[in-house]
Amino acid sequence: MQDNLKSSSYQQLEQKSKYTNMFLRWFLYFVLILFASYFIFPLYVMVVTSLKTMEEIRQGTLLSWPSGLNFESWAVAWGGRGYGAGDTFLKPYFWNSIKMVVPAVFFSTFIGAMTGYVLTKWRFKGDSWVFLFLLFGCFIPFQAILLPMARTLGALGISNSIVGLVLVHTVYGIPFTTLFFRNYYVSVPTELVKAARIDGAGFFKIFFKILLPISAPIIVVTVIWQFTQIWNDFLFGSTFSFGEAAPIQVALNNMVLSSTSVKEYNVDMASAIIAGVPTLIVYVLAGKYFIRGLTSGAVKG
Amino acid sequence: MKTLKIEDLSKNFGSTEVLKKINLEIDEGNFLVLLGPSGCGKSTLLNIIAGLETINEGNVFIDDYNVSKVEPKDRNIAMVFQSYALYPSMNVRENMIFGLKQAKTSKEKIEQQLEKVSKFLQVDQLLERKPSQLSGGQRQRVAIGRALVREPRIFLFDEPLSNLDAKLRVEMRREIKKLHQQLKTTVVYVTHDQTEAMSLGTRIAIMNHGVIQQNDTPENIYNKPSNTFVADFIGSPSMNLIKGSLKESSGEISFTASGSNFEIPVKGYEFKDKSNLNNKEVFFGIRPEHIYFKKSNESDFEVTLRADLSEYIGHEQIMTFDYANQEVLAKFPSTIKIELAKETKLYFDLTQISLFDAQTEERI
């Protein structure tokens, strides 16, 4: 009797917890979908708008589906309409950006790896001060260094050039890349370096043969970070370059803001997507390493 | 010719003195263990021998050649680390021959050495594996192998067994011992584990606060500790140090614990200096395993103590007794039954005692 009572009440409780769980699960999905749509919404608007003709944009609503896959505005955004002056299109500036990003990412990552290596494995007197000052670099608002940097670039004779932008981005990337690599190398046992020294490897050999081969996760993190920063930068690009040497973000701005006639929303949207695609690609290709690299660090011997 | 000689070596990090005027010599083929609590400077000393740390004062000689300013790779040493320090991106083969390749050894010689050593350490099946695919014991073997292929004059071991679990540690300890017996190379081995030190070393140097407290054979370290630190550090549980004073009357010397009038004759003790012993404040040292439950020798001396505490640990039990308000620990087989809070007859083995000056804490 007692047992029966007990088991039936347990059944009731079990039933109840089942309903509660089910409700919570549905609620969870509801919230997730809500937030996901909130974030995907702007992208949706951009994509559909870029596929519409101007006629459709004027007549339809923001959310309405395009009548067909019309890539004309993408072609215009990328290659222009083909008439002479005043026609701004992204193609040359896209290559400008590539020519700026690739060396800037490479140099800042490489130098960051080197400094991180020295700061952790070849400690010297005052190294923590060096690191502290490097960290300051992460917190300096970039507006504060525009004028001195402009003077410096002028003195070096590389103002309004891609080389100048590479230099600026490399220099201001080093604090971040150093921070990344230092924190990664701190967790690599120093005994590795000692063992290599006894084995007769020198400063560079240890770096290239022992440490770099195990740095893949943090290299990916740094490359993604630097690529995004430099590709998306507008401040340095607009300050230190103009006209033909400008990177894509500056060109995008000029395109969207300086059109004198009717606002071509479809071309604007297509341009904006084109300007954003490379970072998206980098994330998709290396994204899974990004989280892994940020959280991991320890290399098990 | 000494294989390794260290002369008046001092080292400080900033204002902290890590090593103070260390003098040390090792003969060919010896296994020297540097033993001490953490922070005593033993690892720093090893790093200095390896050339990984600079010296503030003093010199290091290997085969009578002053290597104080010689690069680690040119000192003819090899080192095995606590974390194994295998290069993670290289497989076992590349790990083992990395040093030889740096030294521009000929291909045939490298292959020959690799084959010999990997067979010897039974890692020849693992040559293509990455360190991450090896177990702890295998990693340790490879790390030793990497040291062996270089055929160094001196092997340096920096707590090589601390990362292994208890069972594997005992196995690897035996393997290192065998290795040393077969190869008869000179070894300097750092550890904080006294069992490791005792079982491996042909000589043990006990360090504390950057000073070598005693450098002797394991037997002497255990039986004749040169000061209270060594006496206390070696043995588990450590040596009982009973505070009291000596009394000399008509040539007979006896010990009286403070707060009691009970006299223990110490006439059989080998004093370094027999003068001025009367009324000297001393520590009377006796190991827990030298206190017996039954009289077995003529020299065993009977005392009556009250049992306060019993700790059962399987094959034996550790009993705590009260001796004039000082704790005295004794180790008995666990088969013996002793009632707590009762006076019990015990026997001190007076051939095994040590006496220390209470002021200087040095053996007298």
Image: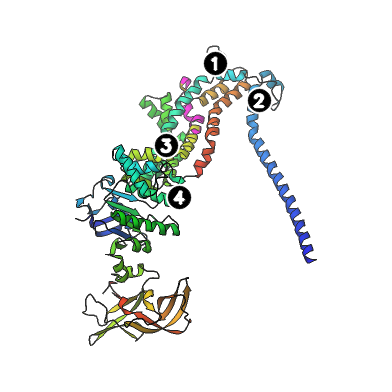
**Callout 1 amino acid:** Asp
Residue at figure coordinates x 54%, y 38% from the top left: A288
Please name which of the two marks, 3 or 1, marks the residue nearer to the observer. 3
Q: Secondary structure at mark 1?
A: loop
In the picture of the structure, the residue carrying the numbered disc 3 is: A174
**Callout 2 amino acid:** Val
**Callout 3 amino acid:** Ile
Report x, y in % for residue A115: 38, 40
- Magenta residues? A228-244
Tags 3 and 4 on a common chain: no
Q: Secondary structure at mark 2?
A: helix
In the picture of the structure, the residue carrying the numbered disc 1 is: A87
For label 4, the crowd category at 10 Å Cα-Cα, with few meaning under 14, some 14 to 19 and many 20 or more, is few
Tags 3 and 1 on a common chain: yes
Q: Secondary structure at mark 3?
A: helix
The residue marked by circle 3 belongs to what chain? A
Majority secondary structure of the magenta segment?
Answer: helix
**In the rendered view, would you say B10 is above or below B237?**
above
Residue at figure coordinates x 38%, y 74% from the top left: B289
Residue at figure coordinates x 54%, y 34% from the top left: A283
In the picture of the structure, the residue carrying the numbered disc 4 is: B135
Position of A59 with respect to B97 (left or right) is: right
Q: Secondary structure at mark 4?
A: loop
For label 1, the crowd category at 10 Å Cα-Cα, with few meaning under 14, some 14 to 19 and many 20 or more, is few
In the picture of the structure, the residue carrying the numbered disc 2 is: A48
Q: CA distance from mark 1 to mark 4?
A: 66 Å
**In the rendered view, would you say A181 is above or below B289?**
above
